[in-house]
Image (cartoon, grey):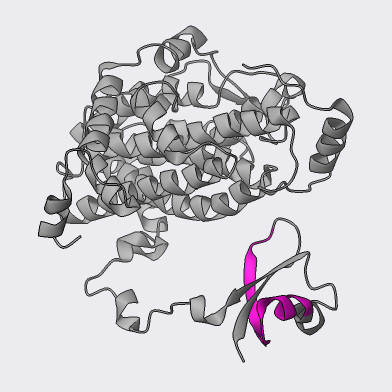
Amino acid sequence: MPTFEVFGRRKQGDDLVHSGQLHAPDLDTAMLLVRETHFRHEEGVEFALVPSEALHVVEDPSILEHSIDMSYRQNHGFTPFGPKRAAAREAAEARGRGDLRRRPVPGREHGTAGEA
Amino acid sequence: MPTFNDDPVRTEEFLASIREGNLVEPHDWMPDEYRYRNIRFIEMHANSELMGALPEREWIARAPTLKRKRSLAAKVQDEVGHGHLIYRVAESLGKPRRQMYEDLVNGRTAFHNVFHYPTFTWADVACIGFLVDGAAIVTQKALLTTSYGPYVRVMKRVVAEESLHYRHGEDVMLALASGTDEQFEMLQEGVNRWWEPIMHFFGNNIPAEDDKAIHWGIKTTSNEQNRQAWMSTYVPKMWDMGIETPDPNLRWDEDDQRWHYTEPDWGRLMEIVKGEGTDATKARLHARKTMWEHHAWLHDVITGDTPEGVTADDLAAVGV
């Protein structure tokens, strides 16, 4: 008996998310059954079925690995920012431009220095 | 702007529904004016992602270190990817992607003002990454509450990647700000150049009730709200680095809880986006058009059309 992949949209605006599988003799029967097996408790506002044989899963996981450091594609490739910001503040003071950060800005009282 | 004959009762129901926060999906009924305005808005956004990759692409070969070269190349790749994701959203409303691309490269449709400007130094890369991407994060985060479902879902991913681009921008900015006097001066000059384009970026101070994009649920925040939000986040960061903002009237008013600033020259914005742009505009559109034309054969091969001037024998010779 064919297998179908079940996708559901939990509420309007959400993505269609994979929520399981279903055995049924054909698509029409699967469409009837899926409401009872997956969506009888108001789990979603929309559902969709795809024959399992239509899914092509990448079997070699090494395709997702990087052979070189690609941390520049991630936030952690740049953090921590604290020391870099402190260095820029120090440089600003040394250039005689430290007053700029004592100007009033939202959430900062006049005359106090920022640590944004 | 075409005229629309949308059923007024149905249109009112539709507007009431999106004001309640309901999202519109591609197969839902929607007023023609909603469809038209969304296509225009989303297409311009996609155009801007694609054209926005070009000013930075100009610096990949000139990046000062290998680290910067790689992160810039990765960013340019992301921006082009955003363009394609967002073109798909516009396409789901009925305008074919190919037509959108043809319209862009032939100058029939617009893209954001900030991508019309030439770049002169590495500081422009810092300013694009820090000022422009910071501004884009403000306006794109606001789009997470737009009314068209596919646009919301795509923007979640785009905003996440955009915040990484901002990290890259701030990193370049901080390096120059804490560098030599020459580097600092170069950065200050960059900020001076980019200040007016950034003020333009958010659009004029049109009241929310007169803004058709807000009426139709495309935007949920006003231009001025976005500009104020941007200034509250990014101006203090620049001042902390000792960078002067080139507007002498710029100041935070604690009593009014808003920023005061000099009104930019809106005529200049119109000259840039509706007129001929700059020399950089022409060069970048030419680059896009040339790439489009030179690679049309590949598009044809992938979509199964036989490229112009290619015979069945030619295809057989390469095993197609």
Q: Quadrant of the C terminus of chain B?
A: bottom left
Q: Which residues are magenta?
A: A14-32
Residue B109 is inside the magenta segment: no
Horizontal side of B123 relative to A99 (left or right) equals left
Question: Residue visible at 49% across and 9% down?
Answer: B265
Question: Residue visible at 62% across and 27% down?
Answer: B223
Residue A65, above or below B7: below
- The outermost residue toward the front is B312
From where the camera sits, is residue A33 visible? yes
- The outermost residue toward the top is B267
Q: Nearer the viewer, residue B124 or A16?
A: A16
Residue B286, above or below B301: above
The location of residue B56, given as percent across then percent down, is 28, 39
The location of residue B23, given as percent across then percent down, is 73, 48
Horizontal side of B76 relative to B240 (left or right) equals left
From where the camera sits, is residue A98 visible? no
Q: Quadrant of the N terminus of chain B?
A: top right
The location of residue B181, given as percent across then percent down, is 21, 34
The location of residue B205, given as percent across then percent down, is 63, 18
Horizontal side of B286 relative to A27 (left or right) equals left
Residue A19, above or below B165: below
